[in-house]
Structure formats: C-alpha cells, structure tokens
Amino acid sequence: MPSTQTLTHQFCHRESIFSWLVKSLAIANRRHCERKSLARLDPHLLRDIGLDPHMVARECAKPFWRD
C-alpha cells in the first residue's frame, strides 16, 4: 500500500496539472476573444491605435494556442 506522503504527492501533482490546464484554457480563450474583437475593428480605428490591417490579419490568423 502506498504511503500517505506518496498519495499526497500524487494528488498535488494532479492538482497542479489540473490548475495548469484550467489556466491554459483560460488564456487560450482570452486570446481567441481578443483576436475576434480585433478583427471586427474598422481600419480607421486600427490606425488610431497604431495598427495596420495587415498586422491585424496576421495576428488573427494565429491559432488560439499561439502567443
């Protein structure tokens, strides 16, 4: 039978993996939403914030897992 310390370590490891997964999914979702919002902006609004449509198109073409 595994010791209590081993079981605690395994639980903490699973918990940290779960926490990492939840955080990663939240970041990916935020990126996806931000890129969708950016894609909807008019070209004149993009220029106002210092972006050109080509930069935005490149950013919006990235998959959600890419930074």
Image: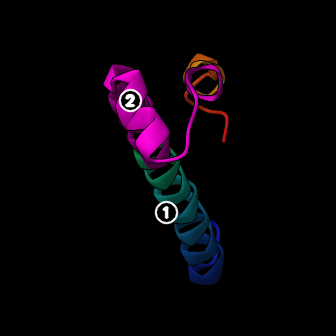
> Which one is in front, 35 or 16?
35
Left/right placement of residue 38 relative to residue 16 reads left
- Report the span colored magenta: 27-56
Residue type, label 1: Glu
Residue 31 visible, this angle: no
For the stretch drawn in magenta, what is the main secondary structure?
A: helix
Residue 10 visible, this angle: yes
Left/right placement of residue 56 relative to residue 40 reads right
Q: Looking at the picture, does residue 9 appear above or below residue 43? A: below
> Which one is in front, 47 or 18?
47
The residue pinned by badge 1 equals 15
**Number of marks drawn:** 2
Circle 2 sits in a helix, a strand or a loop, which is it? Answer: helix
Q: Looking at the picture, does residue 10 appear above or below residue 42? A: below
Answer few, some or many: residues within 10 Å of disc 1's Cα (few below 14, many 20 plus, some between 14 and 19).
few
Label 2 or label 1, whichever lies nearer to me, is 2
Query: CB of mark 2 within 8 Å of CB of mark 1?
Result: no
Residue 23, image x and y in percent? 47, 54
> Which one is in front, 14 or 57?
57
Alpha carbon of mark 2 to alpha carbon of mark 1: how far? 46 Å
The residue pinned by badge 2 equals 44
Q: Is residue 45 magenta?
A: yes
